């Protein structure tokens, strides 16, 4: 049976209007991890770095972290170098009645200078519409057999088709932005990666899912230094951990508690060594506060860093990630509801 794009829009709107993201009561929190491209679709290739390989390795490492956390179920759209039709990726998520859909990619441009991470959500805003980004990520459709029948009425090279995608996902937009914010904040605060922000784009792979969804661009392979980082085991470990932690934080805020443990870190090959110290960030402020307990709701062992006019105040110090999670809970219990764990080398 042929896929009618415009009928699909109407059907999805009906489903979204009758199904809240918070109505999923499965015991496990199900996350779909989608490694971009694959098989005959290599994605970006610069300086010997291949997007399809980097996205797959990083995606599997994200899943490795999450699979060690109680209450999580991880489903991959691909675990090997195979070509998955774009239409089938969201189908996997919808069939599983998943809680989140996370697609992982790498960026590129003709210039070798741009660098940094960015996370896309499906939304209604046209203020930052970049049709070139949308066309590039949707262009995989053209590699599929019978794409004209499968995506009837949709052409990734036509702006009117891209704009048509924006009538979907309004129900889940806020939750997608919340997750995207967690991810970008982790990249920036914990890894000091340059953030290019959170953007709304009409991307088919996000459009067709019935749950909050994000598409992560890990960085630019066209930038040799960033490509080298993303192509390394260490870079993939670090980026994967930040994505996984963001997903855990999202679940903790809206679906109960969970935490990534030291054992999860170690079993994924990311060393938790004596050189890595974890602290709990309490607040960021332009004010230089004396580091006394009365200024921090009775908490002791406070330290601070100063950068770009901002003081970041942290609590505690430990090389044990589980202990850091406990310190985070302590901070939240005394009133720092947004406290989060950060590595400090």
Image (spheres, rainbow, N blue to C red):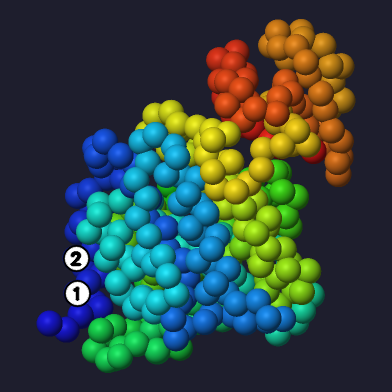
Left of 241 or right of it: where is 11? Answer: left
Residue 203 visible:
no
Compared with residue 329, is residue 45 higher up or lower down, i.e. above or below? below
The reply to whether the C-beta atoms of the residues labelled 2 and 1 are less than 8 Å apart is yes
| Residue at x 53% of width, y 80% of height | 43
Question: In the image, residue 263 lies at what x, y percent?
Answer: 54, 35
Q: Secondary structure at mark 2?
A: helix
> Alpha-carbon neighbours of circle 2 within 10 Å: few (<14), some, or many (≥20)?
few
| Residue at x 25% of width, y 84% of height | 150
* Quarter that holds the N terminus: bottom left
Residue 72 vs residue 296, the one in the foreground: 72
Residue that mark 1 sits on: 7
Which labelled disc corresponds to residue 29?
A: none
> Alpha-carbon neighbours of circle 1 within 10 Å: few (<14), some, or many (≥20)?
few
Residue that mark 2 sits on: 11
| Residue at x 78% of width, y 19% of height | 302
Q: Secondary structure at mark 1?
A: helix
């Amino acid at each position: 049976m042929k896929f009618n794009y415009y009928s699909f829009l109407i059907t999805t709107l009906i489903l979204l209007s009758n199904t809240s993201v918070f109505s999923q009561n499965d015991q496990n929190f199900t996350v779909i991890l989608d490694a971009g491209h694959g098989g005959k679709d290599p994605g970006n290739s610069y300086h010997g770095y291949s997007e399809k390989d980097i996205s797959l390795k990083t995606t599997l490492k994200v899943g490795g972290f999450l699979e060690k956390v109680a209450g999580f179920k991880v489903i991959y759209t691909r675990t090997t170098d195979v070509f998955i039709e774009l239409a089938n990726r969201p189908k996997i998520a919808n069939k599983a009645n998943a809680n989140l859909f996370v697609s992982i990619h790498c960026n590129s441009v003709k210039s070798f200078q741009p660098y940094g991470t960015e996370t896309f959500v499906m939304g209604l805003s046209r203020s930052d519409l970049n049709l070139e980004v949308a066309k590039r990520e949707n262009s995989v459709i053209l590699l599929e057999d019978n794409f004209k029948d499968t995506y009837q009425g949709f052409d990734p090279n036509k702006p009117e088709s891209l704009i048509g995608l924006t009538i979907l996902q309004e129900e889940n937009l806020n939750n997608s932005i919340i997750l995207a914010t967690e991810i970008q904040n982790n990249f920036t605060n914990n890894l000091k990666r340059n953030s290019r922000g959170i953007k709304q784009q009409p991307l088919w792979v996000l459009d067709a899912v019935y749950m909050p969804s994000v598409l992560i661009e890990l960085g630019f392979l066209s930038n040799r230094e960033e490509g080298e980082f993303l192509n390394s085991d260490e870079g993939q470990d670090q980026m994967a951990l930040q994505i996984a932690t963001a997903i855990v934080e999202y679940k903790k805020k809206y679906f109960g508690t969970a935490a990534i443990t030291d054992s999860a870190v170690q079993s994924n090959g990311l060393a938790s060594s004596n050189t890595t110290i974890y602290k709990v960030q309490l607040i960021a402020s332009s004010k230089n506060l004396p580091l006394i307990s009365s200024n921090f709701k009775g908490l002791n062992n406070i330290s601070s860093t100063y950068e770009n006019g901002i003081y970041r105040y942290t609590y505690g110090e430990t090389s044990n990630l589980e202990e850091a999670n406990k310190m985070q809970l302590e901070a939240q219990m005394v009133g720092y509801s947004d406290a989060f764990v950060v590595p400090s080398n």
